[in-house]
Amino acid sequence: MSEIQYLPGKEPHPCEHRLIFKNIDRQGWDTSIETYMADGGYDQLKKALTMEPQAITNEVKTSGLRGRGGAGFPTGVKWGFIPPGNTKPVYLICNCDESEPGTFKDRYIVHQDPHQLIEGMVISAFAVGAHTAYIYMREEFPEAAITMEKAIEEARAKGFIGKNINGSGFDLEIWVHRGAAAYICGEETGLIESLEGKRPYPRIKPPYFPAALGLYMAPTIVNNVESLCHVKHILEMGGEEYAKLGVERNTGTRILCVSGDVKNPGYYEVQVGKLTMGELINDVCGGPKDGRKVKAVIPGGSSSKILRADETFKIGRGDDAKEITFWDIQLDFDTLAACGSMAGSGGVIVLDDSRKMSWVLNNINHFYAHESCGQCTPCREGSTWMRKLSDRIVDGSANPEDIQTLEDVAYQIDGKTVCAFGEASSWPVEAIISKFRDELIAETSENNKHLSKEQLQREAYLAQ
Amino acid sequence: MSDTDTKLLPKDVAAEKGLVNVQIDGHWIQVPKGTRMIEACKIAQKEVPHYCYHPKLSSPGNCRMCLVQMGMPPRLAPGQDPEYSEEGYQEIGWMPRPVIACANTVAENMGIRTQGDLVEKTREGVMEFLLINHPLDCPICDQAGECTLQEFSVEHGKGVSRFKEDKVKKPKNVDIGPRINLDDERCIMCSRCIRFMDEVADDAVLGFTQRGTHTTLTCHPDRKVDSNYGMNIIDLCPVGALTSKDFRFQMRVWFLKETNSIDVNCATGTNITLWSRGDKVYRVTPRRNNDVNSDWMPDSHRLAFHKQVHAESRLTEPMIRQGQKHEVADWRTALEAAADGLKQFDAQEIAIIASARQTNEELFLTRALGDTLGCSEMTTIERFGEADDKLVSADRNPNSLGASIILNLPSPGARLSAIRDAVRSGAIKALVVFSEDLLADAGFTQEDLDQLELLISTNTLANPTAQASHIVFPTASFAEKRGSMINVSGRLQKLNAAIATPANSRDDWEVIRDLILTITGNKNEVFMIEDVLKAMTQAYPEFEGATYSKIGDLGYTVCDTGVTIPLIEKEKARVANREIVG
């Protein structure tokens, strides 16, 4: 890889380990299949088609790959959930509805390296026995849709998609489906409903686990763009070798998308868990802006719980128990979960001491209130109520009581909804209030007495 | 557990019968495998509040009102044997998060808590969310009194509101169909109506637009809810979002008396509830009968009562024709006039037009009248329309089967035309007509009727036959009488009287009885309609052992006609497919 040259200013940081992003912002790189094949592209596909599908699944299981979309569920295990003896068609869906605020990794793959995704998808489809695959592309990626469709045509012309791929007897069609700009379409069952042409209302689980009752009630595997790309590299390296990257139970590389108040925001592909929060922010990203201090970090996309820079965490159990500072947090799934947050989609949002937490809270609430699909009661009504409450905190018309109400509302949503959107919208609120309560209360006043229009009308009527 | 070898565990006992053991609020019960948790709780007499769940529709699990706490035995490590308590159950590990009871099914050794801190807090939270943007306009809302939002807010709500923000504004008084009004602010987005129109009415015209808290129920562009089954969504709506244009603002529901009865507009015999106050029926709603009409009824039948019960043309007094005018008479005079009139004719000169709209009891007495007169010419009038492949039967008479059994009529149409010919030829000089109009439905002409020397009719409404009759008896509408009918699939069902007959009109069976008594001069021995049914049990094998309490609210099958009701067959298929509970 030493010969790879990157565009000026886009060179990888020495801490990085590039697999997926090997070709992103690469000198002389383009999206054509010729460029990709000249770089060894589609070799893994050819190899995969000579293997037993189960052997590929086993490699993925051995690799320990965990889904990169947000939940971090082991990909190989997910593939294994297709009911044995299934007679229905199996579908593979690539979830390219990357819309979690703070996350910007998949967009580079679909814009700059489409064939990597196609190769990963064909291998994965072969492994799970799918003959139809969809790429669910978010509406905001119009260029990527064109790029992907062109790449699919190129791959078809070379015989990597279509009937009898590379002479193996395996058939696969890949379709690009464009969404209509709704965050909820990233939820896998919402995505499936949308793909079926309906409103993207997430389905209840049970009974509608996609691996058994997914698209058109047939077994369906939904994987994130990055996860599918990893499959190609797992095959290239072998599952065991791949598992040596990263740390135990958190293998491979992942792309961290750092945004906010650091000197060098951007994407960084690193080995999972090999970097601490301090190394990421201070070394890789150049630290906070001059004269500023890091106040807090949202580590895995806007829905993950915020971490204070001055917090300490007790992690591990029994003999392994230890106390670590914020700066020592290893950026892997398990450590972040032990710290009460999550690795999520890898969107790291850094906030420095110039940021008001009420504003952060309100900004997040606006997003979730706008994106709630409206299917189930707690999320539909609660997300907008939270927004209205935080609106008043920001404009200074809130009473300290309102902070308590806001926290109660968040807990009334959490764990009671059809899909994980309930947690996505309530966790940030719960965390910000519990960790920055004093700061929020300082923005309120006991003298504030807010009444709704209806309440004002009633008071006016009663005063007559 | 050394005695496990000798003693069967509860799970084995249950499994032999296809059941599972479920602990509900501390009590173990056995329910069939695959039962939904909410239905298991119902069996245990524990009510689980819910909005979106309906046993006849698919379960989207969107209202979140039925959240309960669930527990299962802890997962065993490889090689570990399960441990059983003295009663033979495994210990239940309770889940920290609530689950919906409507769509999840029970499993062996499952625990369900419909009470406790977690469940109560959850319900309180969901109730609060449902109410924050609700207009709370109960004083002017038709649903008040039968609104589950009201009921559950009393049982599970906070009682006070913490919501100080402005409510979301949505469309009000939306005309979504010729018979239905929509208030979007009251809607709680349970989607029952959407699912009904899609899954049962086969006319998916409803849907949501917008998203989040702005989600709005609406009709598809350029469409209306004009299906003949549309009004069922009014009954389905758990709140006052969908209201009936016919019933809205007419009466508070708590003043209404409910009477279980059956519909008389076609041979299906849809089970209904009549909602009345005083002498007025205010509305008709379908009543669940899984073998007849499920939970539904066609709009055409639902609204028919207006023209049948409370019509301007209702006959209220017995009348005798004097020249071209009818004079009001008392019952004794009218009955004697009829009896005397009939005695003037030979038995061969008299014919009786009975009706398949009559109850079995009336038909039985009609036959007795025929026997009294020695009259053998008797028939009913057939009435056919289009079947709709759901609930409306092509046979528009409600009791064709009963008429065919009691009057022994293999082909009523042929006999009717024979009678018509005999009237025209002058062979038949006197006609007794029950609850029918000979001009509109039986092919008679005004000249035919004018030619008759004696025409006696009973009816609820004035019609050309009544106009032409020498003697007219005013009788009861379906809402005012008791009696039984047999539907298209051979099911014996009963009518109940919701209101009294208006003014001097009388129940049909009494009129026929009195006419017989007036003719014979015998002493009355039939005092109650029960006596009529009792006499029928002796006369017909189909009625053997029949009593009104045996017929009950749902009826029972007395003969196998082989005829099925399409909507019921479709529902059975969905139940078998586990799409719905049924």
Image: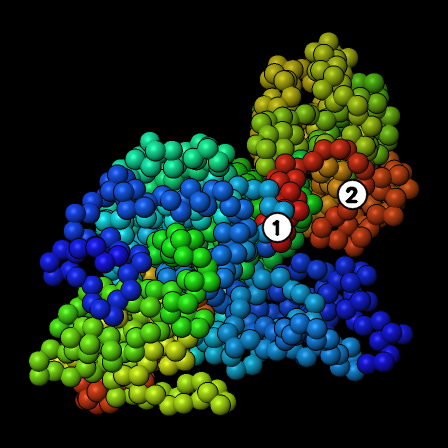
Query: Disc 1: which chain?
Result: A
Taking the image as drawn, is residue B349 in sight? yes
Quadrant showing the N terminus of chain B: bottom right
Q: Nearer the viewer, residue A160 or B459?
A: A160
Same chain? Circles 2 and 1: no
Q: Nearer the viewer, residue A209 or A84?
A: A84
Instruction: Place residue B367 in its image quadrant.
Output: top right
Residue at position x 37%, y 62% from top? A68
Query: Disc 2: which chain?
Result: B
- On screen, residue A399 versus residue A205, left or right, reads left
- On screen, residue B541 versus residue B98, left or right, reads right
In 3D space, how far apart are the residues under numbered discs 2 and 1 (Cα atoms)?
45 Å
Give the answer, above or below, for where B91 lies relative to B536: below
Instruction: Place residue B536 in its image quadrant.
Output: top right
- On screen, residue B116 versus residue B197, left or right, reads right
Give SS at disc 1: loop
Look at label 1 and name its amino acid: Pro
Residue at position x 25%, y 80% from top? A278
Q: Which residue is mark 2?
A: B557
Q: Nearer the viewer, residue A74 or B479?
A: A74
Q: Position of residue A218 (x, y in %)?
A: 52, 46
| Label 1 Cα crowd, 10 Å radius (few <14 / some 14-19 / many 20+) | few
Look at label 2 and name its amino acid: Thr
Residue at position x 33%, y 37% from top? A155
Residue at position x 20%, y 67% from top? A13
**Residue A84 numbered tag:** 1
Q: Nearer the viewer, residue A125 or B95?
A: A125
Give the colour scheme of this rendering: rainbow
Going by the picture, which residue comes out furthest to the front?
A2
